Image (cartoon, coloured by chain):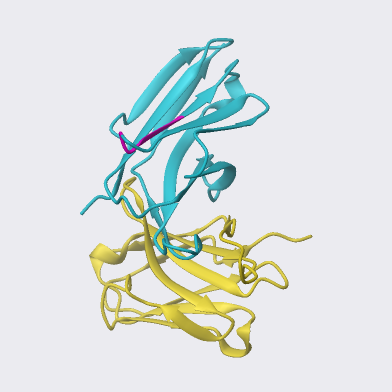
Amino acid sequence: DQQVKQNSPSLSVQEGRISILNCDYTNSMFDYFLWYKKYPAEGPTFLISISSIKDKNEDGRFTVFLNKSAKHLSLHIVPSQPGDSAVYFCAAPANAGGTSYGKLTFGQGTILTVHP
Amino acid sequence: EAGVTQFPSHSVIEKGQTVTLRCDPISGHDNLYWYRRVMGKEIKFLLHFVKESKQDESGMPNNRFLAERTGGTYSTLKVQPAELEDSGVYFCASSHLPASGEGTDTQYFGPGTRLTVL
């Protein structure tokens, strides 16, 4: 039962353009979402998060949008840089309803390649 | 501040052998998690310690896996006997325990241990 889904295995964009990574979820109890970035041979690194009380959170070049009615979130990177090339995971803590910590449920990941 | 460290970085063993993975969390982090990623798929939860207690071990595949966190510091994950399907990358993550009323914790991941069972 895949509660967090990233349906695009890969995405290729040109440097300077916008990268949009998508994530869908099925569990309406999820109330907090995180994006992690992973380089080869490294562990995932926290990138940005969003609480369900918001529909947008911005941090520099990274913006996450949340559409609760559609159970959909997206990560926008603009402008994209070659150093952004990595695997991006969407995740949600499983312990919803008051606390948003605990085991993370991850999507399958999207490989982003940014071409110079 | 040192990050989460894991040892070894790689392990290649034969089916039926035993392997022990170690994780040293960030100092002061009470939460410690183990995850596994198999064949480039999603990262899956294995178990969660709060200090030395197992808070949630619902993701442990079977009784061939044993995790410990004696003293609430570092943790070990033992696989005995290892099977072919145990191959994958094992990640450890740690975080602060949220104070009452706070909702979130940011989990910091180690580099992982790549386990290959032949």
Query: Residue B41: image x %, image y %?
Result: 31, 47
Where is the C terminus of chain B found, in terms of image quarters?
bottom left
> Horizontally, is A13 left or right of B61 in the view?
right
Q: Is residue B7 above or below residue A36?
A: below
Residue positioned most to the left: A1
For chain B, the rendered hue is yellow
Which quarter of the picture shows residue A81? top right
* Residue drawn 61% across the image and 63% down it: B102
Side of B28 relative to A101 (left or right) = right
| x and y, in percent, of residue A59 in the image | 65, 32
Examine the residues drawn in magenta and state their main secondary structure: strand
Query: Does the stretch in magenta take in A71?
Result: yes
- Residue B17 painted magenta: no
| Foreground pick, A26 / B76 | A26
Figure quadrant of residue B89: bottom left
| Magenta part of the chain | A70-74
Look at the image and give the colour of chain A. Answer: cyan
Give the residue displayed 50% in from the left and 44% down from the top. A53
Residue with the most extreme right position: B1
Residue A67 image offset from top left, x and y in percent: 39, 33
